[in-house]
């Protein structure tokens, strides 16, 4: 069994990697990246070489390539040796102008150094000579540009993605020579009054800590990197986006780190557990709050995270669907061709065939006009009110689905030989139904159970959009709208992972529930 | 006893040739299918509605050409309800009986053209997916080498959520009519093929098929005579759920913004354009929704009933 499971998991990982690769090829190789520029006003404003350079900036932002500009290279080089006033340096000026001469620029020592450095790292070079009018005057935006460009191949991209998928924090993460005191240790957390694992030299200050938010214990030690958003959530990691609370600021009365030990308190929304290391230099206003260099913070919000919003709505709907669908479906099968069966069948056909969009809007209209349920989730005045309509819209089709299958399987089982035998043995109708037919019919539903619960984590696309629920359902569609390639890849990996996991869990649950089912072929209970 | 009755009886010769023949009632499969199908009255109603839809979508729509942007320069025509529209255009005509939409376009004409697009789309996608799916599925189930290869392919591709794949494909290859069909069919056949493969696997080793193979029936004949006829009702059942699903899929994809391009009238696009204002301008939103629902319900009900009728066990 363990061997079988290991084989399954390894194959699933392989499948996951292949799927990620396929989507990467689709997204990065087969999309027309020039479409990005068509609607970009900044691109239209520019001309000549400057416009070209801007194109590379855009492509880099969307993750198509990486490039280094020769002037940026010079800046970092001379900033190190000459300090802030490097722009006045004669060598720098000379080096900067060296590329204007298209015939001899490659011989200039700085250019040669630039080329040598990036050639070794597998970069290609793009040289754009000065654009001049016939009169010899330089065109607007026509200055010479030298770039080292790295068009990532799919293999490199995939390799980078896999190797960077999980990262662990260590006390050597922060690159700052002035930081000498590096440690990871348990300390008393002044905000939770409980112990917390605190790091110095790590990216986050609090690595393991407690607070009042569900699930009460949190960690920053291990990080899963699904992908980085390039447009919608500026440069944020998707796992952070879906796990960050939404809604209004939550104001609490706490002490700033500088106020600890005194009896001063301040009203603030700053989440002191979220602080990360500030490399850019601490401002004076931050100095008044913080005692160390961990000064980059986020705010506490009143709402739940996107993932929690989606999951709660989906989970309640799934539970309702199963709790109501099973008895309804069983009742229908027991009174086959009766009035209840016909009504139920009509409902099932309606749910099966009418486009989901149609009935969601139908329920929304009925719910808001007849029952006065709040229409938009976010603007709902009561906390529970906003959940009513989304849950109904998700539960009703799920209900139809459960009813459909349990009825089908019950009727199939009713014609089986063992039922006739049980009848001949003299078992009552009730005993046969609850003791024999129902458990056998449930065998088929067991497989799908983990999937329907894990599926809640992907959110509901239409329902969430119609009722303005801040959830994860719209993540992929908005990413596709805004050509946010990082999110598309992240969603692919996340959804595919959930699908694979649901199938494996479903099989395990099935073999647990029904001893006749054996996942490993051959000897024993195999059918 | 009355001897007069003897005259009513006479001797006949025994016919050895005739006695060798086995007489069974004449049975034609498809005739029985349609006899069972038309026995149900609800099918007549559904067929009538389908005929009305077809006349509307393929007949009337030729005489009522839909021009979505004909009034785009006249902002007074935007979002008019039926009575306002008829008043504004000064005619009590079919064209304005459902009011105007976002750009002063006629909703009634739009629905006719959009219904045509939806029906054509569903038909093309179903034909492609069913043909490819059934053919590959039959070969997949029959050949053991192919089975081992295809299972790996299937296990990888089946892990990709369908919506994700279609969305990414539409995003990558653009939003035209044919690229949309490509996106819907490029892996759509896989699930059908897998289903057929399992069915073929079951039937392939049944006794009658085995006996037929032992008697030297060639493979092609085994597939076409022994296996495929057995699966007619399964294939029709599949078709019954495939056809409406593409209409629903188009509506869904257009709603989330990755459907057909703006120049092609489609139910999904009409719904998507009106969904933001469905409480203020309900005449723009509900007609395409209702038409889409009617089409899918009719196709689903007809398909299910045809599938029931195509099961030989119902023919007795």
Image (spheres, coloured by chain):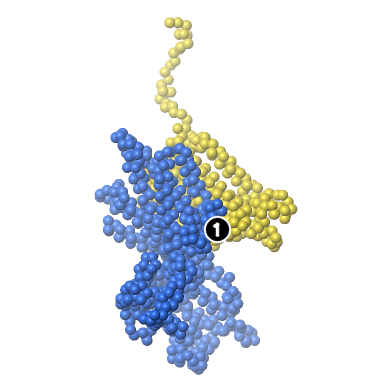
Instruction: Check the image and report above or below for A123 versus B29.
Output: below
**Residue A28 horizontal side relative to residue B92, left or right:** left
Which shade is chain B? yellow
**Callout count:** 1
Do we see residue A395 in this rendering?
A: yes
Of residue B204 and residue B258, the one placed in the foreground of this image is B258
Q: Position of residue B80 (x, y in %)?
A: 67, 56
**Residue B208 horizontal side relative to residue A37, left or right:** left
Residue situated furthest bottom in the rendering: A90
Q: Position of residue A275 (x, y in %)?
A: 40, 76
Residue situated furthest right in the rendering: B90
Q: Quadrant of the N terminus of chain A?
A: bottom left
Residue wearing tag 1:
B254
Instruction: Check the image and report above or below for A65 versus A523.
Output: below
Of residue A458 and residue A278, the one placed in the foreground of this image is A278
Other residues around mark 1 within 10 Å, as few (<14) / some (14–19) / many (≥20): many
């Amino acid at each position: 069994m363990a061997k079988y499971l290991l084989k399954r998991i390894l194959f699933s990982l392989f499948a996951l990697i292949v799927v990620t690769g396929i989507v990467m090829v689709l997204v990065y190789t087969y999309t027309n990246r020039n479409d990005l520029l068509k609607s970009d006003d900044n691109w239209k404003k520019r001309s000549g070489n400057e416009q070209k350079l801007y194109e590379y900036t855009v492509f880099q932002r969307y993750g198509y390539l990486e490039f280094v500009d020769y002037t940026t290279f010079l800046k970092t080089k001379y900033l190190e040796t000459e300090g802030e006033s490097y722009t006045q340096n004669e060598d720098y000026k000379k080096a900067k102008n060296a590329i204007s001469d298209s015939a001899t620029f490659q011989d200039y020592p700085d250019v040669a150094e630039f080329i040598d450095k990036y050639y070794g790292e597998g970069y290609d070079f793009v040289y754009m000579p000065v654009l001049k009018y016939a009169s010899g005057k330089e065109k607007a935006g026509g200055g010479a540009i030298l770039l080292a460009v790295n068009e990532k191949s799919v293999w490199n991209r995939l390799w980078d993605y896999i190797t960077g998928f999980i990262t662990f924090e260590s006390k050597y993460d922060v690159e700052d020579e002035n930081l000498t005191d590096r440690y990871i240790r348990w300390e008393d957390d002044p905000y939770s009054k409980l112990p917390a694992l605190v790091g110095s030299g790590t990216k986050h200050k609090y690595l393991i800590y407690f607070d009042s938010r569900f699930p009460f214990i949190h960690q920053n030690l291990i990080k899963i990197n699904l992908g980085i958003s390039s447009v919608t959530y500026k440069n944020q990691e998707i796992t952070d986006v879906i796990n960050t609370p939404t809604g209004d600021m939550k104001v609490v009365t706490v002490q700033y780190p500088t106020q600890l030990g005194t009896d001063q308190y301040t009203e603030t929304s700053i989440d002191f557990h979220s602080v990360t290391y500030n490399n850019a230099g601490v401002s004076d206003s931050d100095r008044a709050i913080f005692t160390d260099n961990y000064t980059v913070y986020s705010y506490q919000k009143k709402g739940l995270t996107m993932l929690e919003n989606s999951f709660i709505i989906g989970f309640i709907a799934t539970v309702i669907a199963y709790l109501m669908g099973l008895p309804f479906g069983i009742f229908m099968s027991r009174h086959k061709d009766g009035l209840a069966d016909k009504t139920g069948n009509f409902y099932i056909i309606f749910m099966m065939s009418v486009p989901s969009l149609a009935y969601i809007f139908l329920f929304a209209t009925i719910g808001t006009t007849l029952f006065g349920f709040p229409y938009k989730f976010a603007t709902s005045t009561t906390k529970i009110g906003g959940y009513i309509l989304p849950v109904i819209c998700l539960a009703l089709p799920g209900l139809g689905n459960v009813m459909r299958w349990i009825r089908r399987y019950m009727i199939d089982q009713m014609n089986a030989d063992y039922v006739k035998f049980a009848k001949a043995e003299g078992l009552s109708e009730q005993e046969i139904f609850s003791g024999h037919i129902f458990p056998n019919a449930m065998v088929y539903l067991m497989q799908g159970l983990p999937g329907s619960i894990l599926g809640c984590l992907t959110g509901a696309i239409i329902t969430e959009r119609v009722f303005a629920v801040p959830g994860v359902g719209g993540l992929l569609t908005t990413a596709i709208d805004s050509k946010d390639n990082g999110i598309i890849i992240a969603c692919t990996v996340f959804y595919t992972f959930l699908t694979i996991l649901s199938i494996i869990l479903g099989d395990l649950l099935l073999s647990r529930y029904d001893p006749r089912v054996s996942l490993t072929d051959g000897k024993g209970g195999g059918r | 006893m009355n001897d007069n009755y003897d005259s009513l009886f006479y001797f006949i010769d025994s016919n050895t040739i005739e006695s060798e023949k086995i007489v069974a009632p004449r049975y034609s499969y498809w005739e029985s299918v349609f006899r069972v199908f038309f026995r149900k009255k609800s099918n007549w109603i559904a067929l009538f509605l389908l005929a009305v839809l077809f006349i509307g979508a393929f007949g009337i729509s030729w005489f009522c050409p839909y021009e979505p942007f004909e009034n785009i320069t006249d902002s007074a025509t935007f979002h008019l309800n039926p009575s306002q529209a008829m008043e504004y255009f000064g005619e009590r005509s079919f064209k304005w009986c459902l009011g105007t939409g976002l750009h002063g376009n006629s909703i009634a004409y739009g629905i006719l053209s959009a219904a045509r697009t939806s029906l054509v789309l569903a038909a093309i996608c179903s034909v492609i997916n069913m043909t490819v799916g059934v053919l590959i599925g039959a070969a997949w189930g029959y050949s053991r080498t192919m089975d081992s290869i295809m299972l790996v392919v299937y296990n990888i591709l089946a892990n990709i959520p369908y919506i994700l794949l279609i969305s990414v494909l539409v995003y990558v290859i653009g939003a035209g009519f044919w690229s949309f069909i490509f996106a819907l069919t490029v892996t759509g056949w896989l699930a059908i093929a897998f289903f057929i493969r399992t069915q073929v696997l079951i039937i392939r080793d049944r006794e009658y098929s085995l006996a037929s193979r032992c008697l030297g029936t060639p493979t092609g004949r085994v597939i076409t005579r022994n296996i495929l006829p057995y699966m007619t009702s399964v294939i029709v059942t599949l078709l019954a759920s495939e056809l409406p699903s593409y209409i629903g899929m188009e509506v869904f994809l257009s709603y989330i913004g990755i459907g057909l391009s703006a120049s092609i009238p489609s139910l999904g696009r009409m719904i998507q354009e009106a969904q933001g204002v469905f409480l203020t301008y309900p005449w723009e939103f509900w007609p395409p929704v209702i038409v889409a629902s009617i089409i899918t319900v009719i196709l689903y009900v007809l398909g299910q009933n045809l599938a029931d009728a195509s099961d030989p066990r119902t023919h007795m």
